[in-house]
Amino acid sequence: MEEDQRHKIDELPDMVAPAGKFRLYLGAAAGVGKTVAMLDEGRRRNDRGTDVVIGLVESHGRPYTISKCEGLESIPKKLVNYRSTDFEEMDLDAVLLRKPELVLIDELAHTNVPGSSRHEKRWQDVMEILENGIHVLSTLNIQHLESIADVVESITKVKVRERVPDWVVRSADQIELVDSSPEQLRRRLIHGNVYPKEKVADALVNFFRTENLSALRDLALRFVADETEEEMLSYLARMGSTGTWETRERVMAAVTGAPGSESLLHRAARIASRSKGKLLVVHVKSSDAKRMSPDVAQKLESLAQDLGAEYHVIVADLVAGALVSFARSQRVTQIIMGATSHSRWKEFAHGSIVSKVIRAAGESGIDVHVIARQEDTGLLSEKEDYGSAGG
């Protein structure tokens, strides 16, 4: 019923919506044109009479981007001194006090300078603005999506420090891909349209290698294609379309807190996303197993929430039986587990938990995916996260 009411409100633009609308401009990397696309849309709406303001635009000194800001009202930035250095950040309270119809806020993944906002992350500022009924246009590079960040790290060998929970991105009313070929993006970089000249050479041989940009572009295209398909299925369901519909996949990830658990969760989230399924994360506490530390448990639960998953803790000594029993009760269709570290002899003599789950799940028609554990290889460098800049 609530979804039908929201659909009716969308069809009646003169009515006041209960919350702000959220459009996100997504790109493969810095320099593809996300900020310019956001500003072009803001100017178009401003010319049509919409009350538009700039909450914050990261121009990075690019003359063309700066020129696009002309004619639009800007909320003055908040000046914050942190560790003897002055920083300019978005003034959240000033935006809320001004209460425009639409605000433009660049770089959704940005981490706020301590003391500049009551929130740690800019995406949290955006969520509060939306809750106050203000529409938002924002930008994001694909590498900052929580479920994809570890894949990007393995491709680029550059640490992705700033991440946005999947549920935040998927809450956008519209996601628009701003695309650019790797060759075109590298030309922009060489011409000084992305970074200052002193950073160009390093960027070209590191983050902005052609193979890296091709992989990032593919990730962005796949994500937007998945979102578009989901919107179409949702529309057909609202319209009462009849026909054969497959049962929604329900994916369960079993975690132990062992090294590689975060990678396993990211992998499970991508599997659930591609199948438009629900993700459940389960940890079984048993008396004979090594206890998961409270810090690790909290970290995994927080990551599960960021990925839009449900987190469950089960107390049982028969781990394999508990996992499969829970999977049956929740109508799980796929179980994701990490590969066992037991010796081959122990597996033959006693049977690993993984092998027991595979046998029991198979009897219930549940698929089991055994994922190789990916521990920290030390390959990730501390080089500058080039893709974090706007554009």
Image (spheres, rainbow, N blue to C red):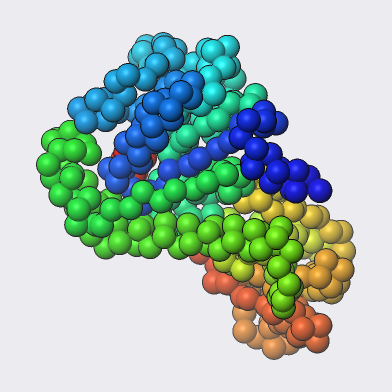
Q: Please name whichever residue, 152 or 349, is drawn nearer the observer in this view of the structure.
A: 152
- Quadrant in which the C terminus is drawn: top left
Q: Residue at x 62, y 51 (%)?
A: 307
The image shows residue 59, relative to residue 352, as above or below, that is above
Q: Is residue 127 left or right of residue 103?
A: right
Residue 174 in view in this figure: yes
Give above or below for 263 relative to 174.
Answer: below
Q: How many marks?
A: 0
Residue at 46% x, 35% y: name it.
Answer: 138
> At x 61% / y 44%, what residue is drawn?
171
Q: Residue 254: in sight, yes or no?
A: no
Q: Is residue 228 above or below residue 244?
A: above
* Residue 148 screen position, x and y as percent: 49, 55
- Measured as percent of width and height from the top left, residue 111 is found at 47, 30
* Residue 301 x %, y %: 70, 48
> Left or right of 286: which side holds 175?
left
Q: Position of residue 368 (x, y in %)?
A: 68, 78
Q: Nearer the viewer, residue 163 or 161?
A: 163
Give the quarter of the image for residue 189: top left
* Residue 168 as seen in the image, left or right of residue 364: left
Please identify the quarter of the rendering in which residue 78 is found: top left
> Residue drawn at (72%, 82%), measured in percent from left and top?
358
> Residue 372's quadrant in the figure?
bottom right
Instruction: Please tell me which residue lies in front, 260 or 203.
Output: 203
